[in-house]
Amino acid sequence: MISDITIGQFMPGRSFVHKIDPRMKIILMTAIIVFIFLAKNLFSMGAMVGFVALAVLFSRIPLRMYFKGLKAIWFLVFFTAALNMLYIKGEHLVFQYKVLTIYEEALWQSGFIAVRLVLIVLISSMLTYTTSPTDLTAAIERLLAPLKLFRLPVHELAMMMTIALRFIPTLLEETEKIMNAQKARGADMESGGVIKRAKALIPILIPLFISSFRRAFELATAMDCRCYTGGKGRTRLNVLKYRFRDFFAFLLVGGLCAGILYLNTLAPSLVR
């Protein structure tokens, strides 16, 4: 399960999605996530699903990577959908057994929530798959530049966010190695109640914390050796510039957002 979490990994490529300016990718990703929640009927949600599917294909990232990332959230998707199915009330009863009642409105709501979660994970994964940590840091720093007026250390904040995102796969891999090592020593992490399983995590968490602090110190030392002093007076080898393809992507997503708003008017809303 841990090895299935792929968010934070970068896969080099020369696809259209790879070449989009990272600032534009962050802006467009945010807009797409917002309009995923604004899709209210089958027409608008179908358009959103089709657009995300095309974006996944145009990214030229192997589909197995996306499916591998989705495997880690299937439980969350089904659990969230089941909760909404059981607790949302409506007017059209579909199934009833004693205290268990399921309404048609609850089924639609659960389905839309499941689709939304899957689409959000796909879009978020695409951002990290197609954007290098260096470009991601530069993009976040440029987007947060207005906060410099409030004397906030924008460059340092961007660096911290990117490093945290970049080390997610590394820490997950380290966790899996520690778990396999403990199992080889006879540790039982799968049987027993909740309290016993929680106690079984202690031999994993302690080495993981020690490894994390060691990696942090090594990273800090490496940055000191390269004379890193923060963002003040820092220049870049590759300066981010908007190009025609970035404006084309902006118009494409803008058209999608306008289309979602229009399609929402063609049929009644199926979700709250």
Image: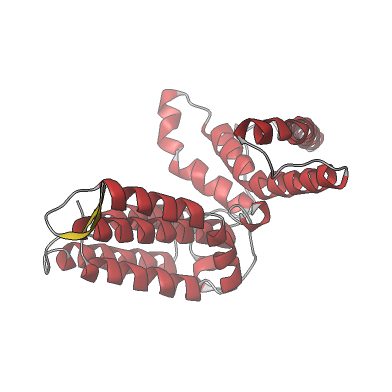
Image quarter in which the N terminus is found = bottom right
Total count of labels: 0
Q: Nearer the viewer, residue 109 or 32?
A: 109
| Relative to 82, residue 14 above or below | below
Q: Nearer the viewer, residue 99 or 53?
A: 99
Q: Nearer the viewer, residue 180 or 132?
A: 180
- Could you tell me if residue 49 is visible in this image? yes
The residue sitting at 56% across, 53% down in the picture is 239
- Report the side of 196 relative to 84 (left or right): right
| Relative to 95, residue 158 above or below | above
Residue 113 location, quadrant: bottom left
- Report the side of 80 relative to 38 (left or right): right
- List x then y, in percent, for residue 47: 29, 71
Residue 230 location, quadrant: top right
Q: Residue furthest front?
A: 98
The residue sitting at 27% across, 45% down in the picture is 87
